[in-house]
């Protein structure tokens, strides 16, 4: 935590800000990009959102009070940015958020930045059908390997609620994948 | 800084080649541009404030309180000016010619009683 405070101080101080921010981007760009990409699915959209996220971090670093870790704070901004992005896109199309995400997942086969096999595609589509909260919890727990405490801080939800969300998500996906398994 | 392991390829999602290098450059370029824009805005606000302050100072310096008094009492000042002019420039005969006959009778009626 002391190391983080020094780093945050460097981020806030005009003389060291540029260098510290470059280090921050270098350290977190991939992780934030993939976190966002799993929410918005499309590469170009994820690119826009991750850039906006870093710009927001840069603009608001003065307001960061260190009540949480820098990592948690940035993940929270990234999650909110991604969800707001989906809401605005869906609204423009006259769709619900869920419908928009499902439509994106259905179009993945034609996406030039998707090279998954049939199983990956099926998993992707099933994850897209989960309710928003369950989908994000599933992504963070299953794919990013984050622990419940960290997810709880980022999403501002109790660990118990997160465990329930994850449990429901896994159950739904398992059921769907078993139903659609041709070998069954 | 906290690290997490990430299983990115499980979804089959990909990025263009060299994407993350370009992303980093783009983010740094945009944030630096924003910094410069903020600096420029601060400078613009400062210049505007100083200009307004200078204008006020100039206005209050140029307009003295005595002039203000004259402006507020324009009518009175004009009457005084006319009165002074007539008294100083005209002799009694000339003043008399300016008055109409009726006025002469009412204004200059001689009263013999003390």
Image: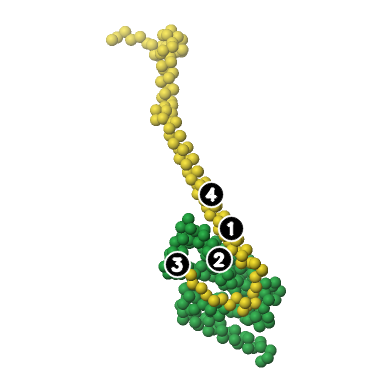
Chain colours: A green, B yellow
Q: Is residue B82 left or right of residue A28?
A: left
Task: Determine which residue is flagged by label 1.
Answer: B29
Do pointers 1 and 2 mark residues of a single chain?
A: no
Along the viewing direction, whichever of A91 and B59 lies nearer the viewer: B59
Label of residue B43 in the image: none
**From the viewer's perspective, is residue B8 above or below residue B67?**
below
Measuring 48% from the left and 68% from the top, which residue is drawn there?
A70
Q: Is residue B44 visible?
A: yes
Q: Residue furthest left?
A: B114
Measuring 69% from the left and 73% from the top, which residue is drawn there?
A111
Q: Nearer the viewer, mark 4 or mark 3?
A: 3
Query: Which of the two labelled residues, at mark 3 and mark 2, occupies the earlier sequence position?
Result: 3
Query: Which of the two labelled residues, at mark 1 and mark 4, occupies the earlier sequence position?
Result: 1
Label of residue A26 in the image: 2
**From the viewer's perspective, is residue B2 above or below residue B41?**
below
Task: Determine which residue is flagged by label 4.
Answer: B40
* Mark 4 neighbour density, 10 Å: few (under 14) some (14–19) many (20 or more): few
Do pointers 2 and 4 mark residues of a single chain?
A: no
Label of residue A4 in the image: 3
Cα gap from disc 2 to disc 4, whole angstroms: 28 Å
Cα gap from disc 3 to disc 2, whole angstroms: 16 Å
Q: Position of residue A132 (x, y in %)?
A: 56, 75
Cα gap from disc 4 to disc 3, whole angstroms: 31 Å
């Amino acid at each position: 935590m002391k190391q983080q405070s020094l780093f945050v101080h460097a981020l806030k101080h005009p003389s060291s800000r540029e260098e510290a921010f470059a280090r921050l981007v270098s350290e977190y760009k991939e992780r934030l990009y993939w976190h966002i990409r799993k929410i918005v699915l499309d590469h170009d959209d994820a690119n826009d959102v991750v850039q906006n996220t870093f710009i927001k971090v840069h603009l608001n670093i003065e307001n960061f009070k260190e009540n949480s870790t820098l990592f948690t704070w940035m993940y929270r901004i990234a999650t909110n940015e991604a969800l707001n992005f989906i809401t605005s896109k869906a609204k423009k199309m006259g769709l619900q958020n869920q419908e928009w995400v499902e439509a994106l997942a259905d179009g993945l086969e034609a996406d030039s930045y998707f090279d998954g096999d049939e199983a990956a595609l099926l998993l992707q589509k099933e994850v897209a059908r989960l309710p928003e909260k369950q989908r994000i919890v599933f992504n963070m727990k299953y794919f990013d390997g984050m622990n419940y405490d960290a997810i709880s801080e980022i999403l501002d939800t109790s660990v118990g609620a997160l465990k329930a969300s994850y449990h429901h998500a896994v159950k739904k996906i398992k059921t769907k994948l078993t139903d659609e398994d041709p070998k069954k | 800084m906290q690290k997490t392991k990430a299983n990115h390829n499980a979804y089959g999602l990909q990025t263009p080649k060299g994407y993350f290098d370009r992303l980093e450059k783009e983010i740094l370029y945009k944030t630096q541009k924003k910094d410069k824009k903020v600096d420029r805005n601060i400078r613009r606000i400062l210049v505007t404030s100083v200009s307004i302050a200078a204008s006020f100072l100039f206005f209050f310096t140029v307009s003295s309180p005595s002039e203000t008094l004259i402006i507020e009492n324009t009518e009175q000042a004009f009457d005084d000016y006319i009165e002074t002019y007539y008294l100083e420039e005209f002799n009694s005969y000339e003043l008399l010619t300016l008055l109409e006959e009726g006025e002469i009778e009412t204004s200059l009626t001689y009263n013999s009683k003390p």
